[in-house]
Each structure stands twice: as structure tokens, then as C-alpha cells.
Amino acid sequence: MNSLVRTLATPLSPVMVSITNNAPAQTSPSGAVDPVTGRYISPYQNADGSLNGTGVAVAAVSTVSMALSAYHGLKRNRGSIGYAVLWGIMGATFPVLVPVIAFGQGFAEPEKK
């Protein structure tokens, strides 16, 4: 077994050495950074960390989309909790696109077989 592992690992050894010796490049946030704390400043937050008006609107739209999408997934797939969770996650992630698809399919109508 050891000879097999050694045989398989030998061609990869230069690659593994290259990966471990070459650290990834340093990255920085694309937005503004607070010079005092060094933390990223989100466009959706105030200086004290609370959500500003835009942040509240985005959160509200995402939450409503998640609820509508989860309900649609539950009813469309005849009570499947798995599909409700999946549709809810997708609705929160893509808050405009998923409800449009749900209404295009016939909101909360069971899938025709």
C-alpha cells in the first residue's frame, strides 16, 4: 500500500510544494475602509453599524421575497418542506427574479403532472 501511495503522490509532489510555498495574493475590499478601525464600510450601514434606509429596504424586499417563494414552493410541490426551503433560500438570494418565476408558473398552483 505504501508503494502505491508513494507512486501516486510522486507526480503531485511539485504541485503540492508549489501550492504550499506560494501564498495567495493579498486582497482588499472593493469599497471604502474606515481609517480608524480598518473595517470595510458597507453602503447599507451607518457609521455606528446600524442599517441605513437602503439596507432596511433591501432586507425587507429580500424577506418578503423569501416568504412568497417558500409558500409557492410548498404549494407547487404539494406540501414538500424541502422544496419550500429551497424556494425560500433562492427567493432570499435573488429577491426579484424568483418571485417573477413563481408568478410565471402560476403562484402557489400545484405542478401539473
Image (spheres, helix red, strand yellow):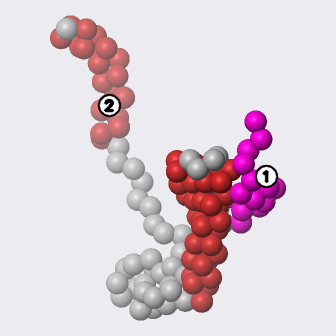
Relative placement, left or right, of 97 versus 1 is right
Q: Residues within 10 Å of mark 2 (few under 14, many from 20)?
A: few
Q: Residues within 10 Å of mark 1 (few under 14, many from 20)?
A: some
Q: Amino acid at mark 1?
A: Gln
User: Marks 1 and 2: which is nearer the front?
Assistant: 1
- Closer-to-camera residue (98/2): 98
Residue 43 shows in this picture = no
Residue 108 is drawn in which quadrant? bottom right
Q: Which residue is mark 2?
A: 16
Q: Secondary structure at mark 1?
A: helix
Does residue 51 lie above or below 96 as drawn? below
| Mark seen at residue 105 | 1
Taking the spot 65% from the left edge, 54% from the top edge, the residue there is: 75
Residue 104 is drawn in which quadrant? bottom right
Taking the spot 23% from the left edge, 13% from the top edge, the residue there is: 6
Quadrant of the rendering where the N terminus is positioned = top left
Does residue 95 lie above or below 108 as drawn? below
Q: Which residues are magenta?
A: 96-113
Residue 108 part of the magenta-drawn span: yes
